[in-house]
């Protein structure tokens, strides 16, 4: 059988496959299930090797977060934020504490607020804010998610902020490999005055505007928390990303073959004793949508 | 192309409502993997049952068709579960 013939045999209804795309035959479905499970197992085994080839990482980098945040501010008619190493140190401390105390929240289980880390890093703020994110594969999607949330958006386009600090830290949080992104904003003076008024907050937001009297002398810890640079900066394939790609590719392939089978079988007016393609298409489409939701990152 | 949907509109309406309810549950409980797994298990089981009942209505139920719905359902739960576990 020629290559074209094989493709037709596997993907379109024809006399050679009893007028049903061979990929949709029960024997092929069992084969696809087996291959899918085997590939997933292989990816997980690869992740558990001593060399730790995979592990959850993403393409999010500090530089990209700063650049995209500033681009968003510029498009909102605001000034850009300058990168502040003390704020970045505070962000790394926060991320390290989240991994150490194993929590996904602005305040730690032991009661440490975000502002503790500003002070620990020696950043004497007059205005400060914090955005958190995890599990995002790309910076742009993460920024989009923040901008879609009113309270996070308020932080990004707050005209009072002058400086920014970012930490992108891989680790295991609540049993899952992830990449945490801590975005801290601050200003040590009154803040730039722009034409745009800050948005009114109707719900408790991660931004606080502390009174000057609340700012105590910074508690400086001698050793700054510095995550390994290579792990943060280098985008690489992750177990999660491979599994996500595998899932989306499998569902998309099935939808395409089902649609092609449906159209061709209708045009040939063949009668078959098989499952309903429309039902399978609806079912697999909703599974695909669930996969997209499950694999989307989270913000706080 | 839409003949089956036209012939059995109630069956497909039920499937659409079921799918919509599943997606809303996943969206609302996206931070709770166990809830998503339960919702997916329920959705997949009901889809399998839907297939059998629909083919009973259409008087086209056959062992091979039951196996096809079982395998498609299994593929659905395996795809979602591998991302949760």
Image (cartoon, coloured by chain):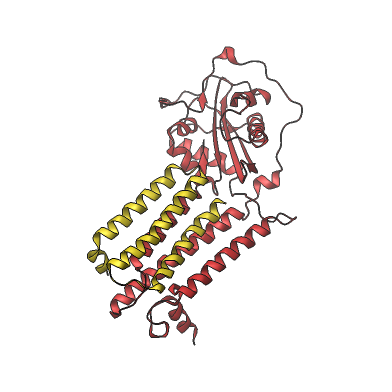
Chain colours: A red, B yellow
Residue A217 found in image quarter: top right
Above or below for A26 versus A177 = below
Q: Total marks drawn?
A: 0
Above or below for A80 versus B40 = above
Q: Where is residue A113 in the image (x, y as percent from the top left)?
A: 59, 25
Q: Where is residue A47 in the image (x, y as percent from the top left)?
A: 67, 56
Q: Position of residue B79 (x, y in %)?
A: 50, 59
A87 sits left or right of A224 in the view: left
Q: Residue furthest left?
A: B6
Residue B68 found in image quarter: bottom left
A234 sits left or right of A153 in the view: right
Q: Residue furthest bottom?
A: A1
Task: Name the residue located 41 percent from the left edge and 70 percent from the top edge.
Answer: A257
Q: Which residue lies furthest to the right in this view?
A: A222
Q: Position of residue A6 (x, y in %)?
A: 48, 82
Task: Name the residue located 47 percent from the left edge and 41 percent from the top edge.
Answer: A145
Residue A264 found in image quarter: bottom left
Above or below for A28 versus A168 = below
Q: Residue furthest top?
A: A213
A196 sits left or right of A240 in the view: left
Task: Name the residue located 65 percent from the left edge and 50 percent from the top edge.
Answer: A234
A269 sits left or right of A57 in the view: left
In depth, the one of B34 and A153 nearer the eye is B34
């Amino acid at each position: 059988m020629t290559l074209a013939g094989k493709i037709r045999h596997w993907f379109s209804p024809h006399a050679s496959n009893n007028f049903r795309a061979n990929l949709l035959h029960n024997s092929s479905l069992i084969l696809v299930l087996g291959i899918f499970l085997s590939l997933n197992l292989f990816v997980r085994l690869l992740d558990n090797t001593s060399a730790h080839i995979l592990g959850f990482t993403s393409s999010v980098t500090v530089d990209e977060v700063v650049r995209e945040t500033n681009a968003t501010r510029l498009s909102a008619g605001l000034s850009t934020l300058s990168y502040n190493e003390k704020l970045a140190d505070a962000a790394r401390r926060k991320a390290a504490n989240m991994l150490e105390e194993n929590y996904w929240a602005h305040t730690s289980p032991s009661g440490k607020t975000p502002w503790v880390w500003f002070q620990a890093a020696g950043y004497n703020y007059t205005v400060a804010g914090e955005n958190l994110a995890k599990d995002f594969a790309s910076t742009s999607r993460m920024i989009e998610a923040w901008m879609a949330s009113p309270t996070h958006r308020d932080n990004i386009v707050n005209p009072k902020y002058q400086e920014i600090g970012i930490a992108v830290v891989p680790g295991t949080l609540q049993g899952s490999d992830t990449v945490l992104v801590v975005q801290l904003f601050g200003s040590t003076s009154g803040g730039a005055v722009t034409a745009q008024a800050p948005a009114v907050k109707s719900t408790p937001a991660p931004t606080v505007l502390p009174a000057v009297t609340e700012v105590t002398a910074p508690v400086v810890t001698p050793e700054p928390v510095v995550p390994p640079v290579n792990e943060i900066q280098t985008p690489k394939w992750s177990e999660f990303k491979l599994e996500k790609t595998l899932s989306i590719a499998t569902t998309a392939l099935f939808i395409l073959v089902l649609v092609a089978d449906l159209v061709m079988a209708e045009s040939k007016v063949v009668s078959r004793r098989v499952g309903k393609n429309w039902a399978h298409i609806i079912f697999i489409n909703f599974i695909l949508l669930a996969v997209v939701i499950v694999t989307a990152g989270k913000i706080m | 192309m839409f003949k089956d949907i036209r012939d059995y509109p109630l069956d497909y309406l039920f499937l659409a409502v079921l799918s919509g309810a599943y997606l809303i549950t996943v969206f609302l409980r996206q931070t709770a993997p166990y809830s998503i797994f339960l919702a997916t298990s329920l959705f997949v089981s009901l889809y399998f049952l839907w297939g059998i009942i629909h083919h009973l209505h259409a008087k086209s139920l056959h062992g091979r068709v039951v196996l096809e719905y079982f395998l498609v359902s299994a593929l659905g739960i395996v795809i979602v579960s591998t991302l949760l576990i």
